Image: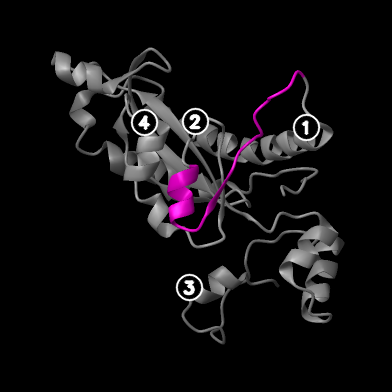
């Protein structure tokens, strides 16, 4: 008869009767971790080291694009043209928590915008807190912007020699295993069939609402499971 804390909060008062949250099997290791925190008073970073969980990653971000109709205006065509996929697109940023839940959805911008500019303009930086770790791929050159908000960028290490060191190889694998969650979340969004075809320009007035709704509705499809989690230092 578990009631998750987030659901209890929505009721306004913890003491209010409420229906139990969806059933899930509580792993023995999770219960032991909880006991170590409550009974022994171990700090989160200590528990992260013991149980091999990352204490740093708060959000995982990525950008994605959906095809749109080519405008008749040559100026607008150049704005929506994406050199990355060689067609006209709308582009947006999605943020998920390490648990896999979509927690932030940007507006859709014209396809020519860079990942860096989109991150700066969409408002996500204002939601980060000092000490937060933001995981992304190597294309996100946003380390300075994050540092200005007290956050840090977690990306795969760049290859500077013929072969990765063992530490860099392990870090690359760990980041890849977590980043696959945001890719799965994006895939779920695009499984809504409205994105199967090119988006007509006539939908430009409501496209942001449609995109946001589809992104948030994926949270009702169950967890994005990740097996064999590896911590990211």
Q: In the rendered structure, which disc, 1 or 3, sits on the residue that comes first in sequence?
A: 3
The residue where tag 4 is placed is 91
Taking the magenta stretch, the answer to whether it contains residue 152 is yes
Q: Is residue 102 above or below residue 169?
A: below
> Which label lies toward us, 3 or 4?
4
Say which of 48 and 17 sits in front.
48
Q: Which colour scheme is used?
A: one colour
Q: In this view, does 71 lie above or below 222?
A: above
Q: Which residue is drawn at 64% across and 29% down?
A: 158
Q: Point out residue 206 in the picture as x, y percentages from the top left corner.
A: 23, 39
Separation of disc 3 and disc 2 at Cα? 29 Å
Separation of disc 2 and disc 1 at Cα? 33 Å
Q: Which residue is drawn at 42% across and 33% down?
A: 115
Q: In the rendered structure, which disc, 1 or 4, sits on the residue that comes first in sequence?
A: 4
Res. 30 in view: yes
Helix, strand or loop status at disc 1: helix
Q: Point out residue 107 in the picture as x, y percentages from the top left corner.
A: 32, 42
Residue 169 is marked as 1
The answer to whether 109 appears left or right of 139 in the picture is left
Give the residues in magenta. Answer: 143-162
Helix, strand or loop status at disc 2: loop
* Callout 3–callout 2 Cβ contact below 8 Å: no
Residue 10 is marked as 3
Say which of 25 and 150 sits in front.
150
Q: Residue most toward the front? A: 161
Residue 191 is marked as 2
Say which of 224 and 138 sits in front.
138
């Amino acid at each position: 008869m578990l009631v998750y804390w987030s659901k209890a909060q929505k009721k306004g008062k913890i003491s209010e009767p409420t229906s139990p949250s969806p059933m899930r099997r509580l792993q023995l290791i999770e219960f032991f971790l909880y006991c170590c925190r409550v009974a022994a008073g171990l700090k989160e970073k200590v528990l992260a080291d013991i149980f091999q969980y990352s204490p740093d990653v708060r959000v995982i971000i990525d950008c994605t694009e959906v095809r749109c109709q080519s405008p008749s205006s040559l100026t607008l065509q150049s704005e929506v043209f994406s050199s990355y996929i060689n067609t006209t697109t709308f582009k947006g940023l999605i943020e998920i928590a390490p648990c896999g839940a979509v927690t932030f959805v940007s507006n859709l911008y014209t396809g020519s915008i860079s990942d860096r500019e989109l991150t700066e303009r969409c408002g996500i930086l204002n939601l980060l807190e000092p000490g937060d770790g933001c995981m992304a791929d190597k294309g996100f050159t946003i380390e300075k912007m994050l540092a200005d908000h007290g956050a840090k960028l977690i990306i795969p290490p760049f290859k500077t020699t013929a072969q990765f060191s063992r530490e860099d190889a392990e870090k690359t694998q760990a980041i890849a295993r977590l980043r696959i969650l945001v890719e799965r979340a994006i895939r779920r969004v695009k499984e809504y069939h409205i994105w199967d075809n090119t988006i007509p320009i006539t939908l430009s007035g409501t496209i942001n609402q449609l995109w946001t709704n589809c992104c948030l509705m994926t949270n009702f499809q169950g967890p994005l499971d990740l097996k064999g989690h590896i911590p990211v230092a």
